[in-house]
Image (cartoon, rainbow, N blue to C red):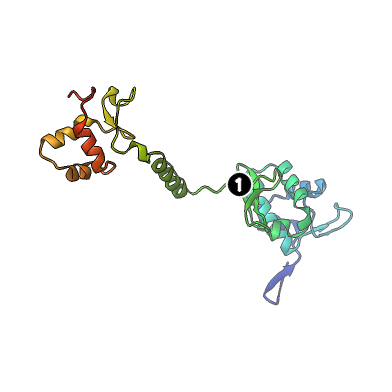
Amino acid sequence: MSIVQNSNVIGAFSEEHAERLSGVSSAQLRRWDRLGFFKPSYAAEDRHLPYSRIYSFKDLVALRVLNELRNNHRVSLQHLRKVAETLGHLKDDLWSSTTLSVLNKRVVFNEPETSKPREVVSGQYIADIPLRVVISSTRKAVGEMNKRGKAEIGQIVRAKFNNRNAAVVAGTRIPVRAIRHFADAGYPAAKIVKEYPDLTIEDIEAAIAYQGPGVAA
């Protein structure tokens, strides 16, 4: 039976009602009561009496949450008991008034003080890593890594394993011979820079003037 009062549902529900409304089987309800994990709000000392277990509306809300955690997400009863112990200060509001989540069959809740999701038993915070942030930060890191130092501007080097030991513009993998192909085709330095935005006029001039080894086509 249930009673509606001031737009709030209050009342008493039998074990049969609790099973039907929460999804938790009567066998589970009795086991949880026997283990002391979840007791009905109104219970006779002798549980063998008819209607000895009576559940409140708040109990039903909590049981629906527990059904989701235990039966649908397969969170172990042992873990749920540890959650209940850890969040014991929440008392009757633990299962019925607390927003809970599940990660790898473990219960997570938003810590009120920090608004951060935290795994209840271990106390470990759950990292929220949006993919767009990862992509953005990776691009930034690559850009920083590829920045050329001032000492590299206008310098030609031959680095081992870099472009088969060919002469290249320092701080890049751009071969001197590629720049010279454009120069031989009549491209002025400013136009070659448009082909290689990472280079400067000084780099182009240095490549054209370079007389060392590693330029053969």
Residue 55 falls in image quadrant: bottom right
Identify the residue at image location x=87%, y=57%. Answer: 44
Where residue 70 sits in the image (x, y, percent)? 66, 46
**Residue 93 in view in this figure:** yes
Horizontal and vertical percent for residue 75? 66, 43
Identify which amino acid the numbered label 1 is placed on: Ile
- Secondary structure at badge 1 equals loop
Nearest the camera: 99 or 125?
125
Image quarter in which the N terminus is found: bottom right
Q: Horizontal and vertical percent for residue 16? A: 72, 56
Q: In this view, does 139 lie above or below 169?
A: below
Image position, residue 27 (x, y; %): 74, 47
The residue where tag 1 is placed is: 126
In this view, which residue lies farthest toward the bottom? 6
> Is any atom of residue 17 visible in this view?
no
For the point 26% across and 25% down, the residue is 166
Is 15 left, or right, of 43 in this rendering? Answer: left
Between 171 and 90, the one nearer to me in the picture: 171
- Kindly identify the residue that appears in the image at 30 percent across and 25 percent down: 158
- Can you tell which quarter of the image residue 193 is in? top left
